[in-house]
Structures are given as C-alpha cells and as structure tokens.
C-alpha cells in the first residue's frame, strides 16, 4: 500500500474524532467551541452550527477512510493508523477544551 493511503486514514480518524463532540453537543442542544465562534476555537457556537460542523467532519472522515485506498476494519495496520489520528486529536481536544470546561483539574 502506498504511504498517502495511510496519511488519508490518519486524517480520516482525526476528522471522525472531531465529529463526536460537535455532533454530540449539537444534537443535545448545547453550544460548544468551534472554528466559527468569536474568537475561533474559544467562543461558543450554537448547537445548529455544531451539528453542521460535526456532519461535515463525518463526511470528511468517510471520504478519507472509505474512498481513498482500500481501508479494511479487519486490517490492524489500517485501524491503528486511523485510531492514532483519532487519539491524537482527542488528546489535543481534551487539553484545549479542558481549560474551558474544567477538564484539566486533578480529581480530588
């Protein structure tokens, strides 16, 4: 398999991970940070904006995972590459958004 298939799977996993908080908050009717807020990434966007942003991320994940190369859920390497993209973005989001929602405090 060529290297850029793996790059596509990595970013597909990242887009999939990014879809979860936006889509989840949006369908729950809660505002959440998005690139469209003021200031970008810090201010809150409406639940509608977050549903749309989450849906966009799902579409991008689909395109990068299902339309590039031959992604196979039974292939450990494919899943590990996509999973590492998802994990990296999830950890980055936890650090970034934890400062707004109290996620960076140690439990008592």
Image (cartoon, rainbow, N blue to C red):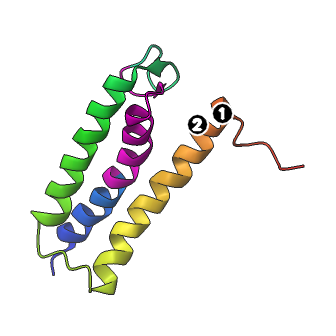
| Crowd around label 1: few <14 · some 14–19 · many ≥20 (10 Å) | few
Q: Which mark is residue 101?
A: 1
On the image, the x and y values in percent for residue 51 come to 31, 33
Over which residues does the magenta segment extend?
Answer: 15-36
In the image, residue 10 sits, relative to residue 81, either above or below, namely: above
Against 58, is 4 above or below?
below
Q: Give the CA separation, mark 1 to mark 2.
A: 6 Å
Horizontal arrangement in the rendering, residue 67 relative to residue 93 (left or right): left
Q: Secondary structure at mark 2?
A: helix
- Quadrant of the rendered structure where residue 82 is? bottom left
x 30%, y 56%: residue: 11
Is the residue under label 2 in contact with that under label 1 (CB below 8 Å)?
yes
Q: Secondary structure at mark 1?
A: helix
Number of numbered callouts drawn: 2
Relative image position of residue 23 (x, y in whole percent): 36, 40
Residue sitting at x 14%, y 55%: 63
Classify mark 2: residues with Cα within 10 Å, few (<14), some (14-19) or many (20+). some
Indicate the quadrant where residue 75 lies: bottom left
Q: Nearer the viewer, residue 1 or 93?
A: 93
Where residue 18 appears, as percent x and y from the top left, is: 39, 46
Disc 2 marks which residue?
97
Q: Is residue 15 left or right of residue 22?
A: left
Residue projecting furthest to the top: 38
Residue in the foreground of this view, choosing between 34 and 40: 34
Q: Residue furthest right?
A: 108
Instruction: Work out whether residue 93 or residue 30 is closer to the camera in this orientation and state it.
Output: 30
Residue 38 is tagged as none
**Looking at the image, is 5 positioned above or below residue 19?**
below
Name the residue: 52% across, 44% down: 93
């Amino acid at each position: 398999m060529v290297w850029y298939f793996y790059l596509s799977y990595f970013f597909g996993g990242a887009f999939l991970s990014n879809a979860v908080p936006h889509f989840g908050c949006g369908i729950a009717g809660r505002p959440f940070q998005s690139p469209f807020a003021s200031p970008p990434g810090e201010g809150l966007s409406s639940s509608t904006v977050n549903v749309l942003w989450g849906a966009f991320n799902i579409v991008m994940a689909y395109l990068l995972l299902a339309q590039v190369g031959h992604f196979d859920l039974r292939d450990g390497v494919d899943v590990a590459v996509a999973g590492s993209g998802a994990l990296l973005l999830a950890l980055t989001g936890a650090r970034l958004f934890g400062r707004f929602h109290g996620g960076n405090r140690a439990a008592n």
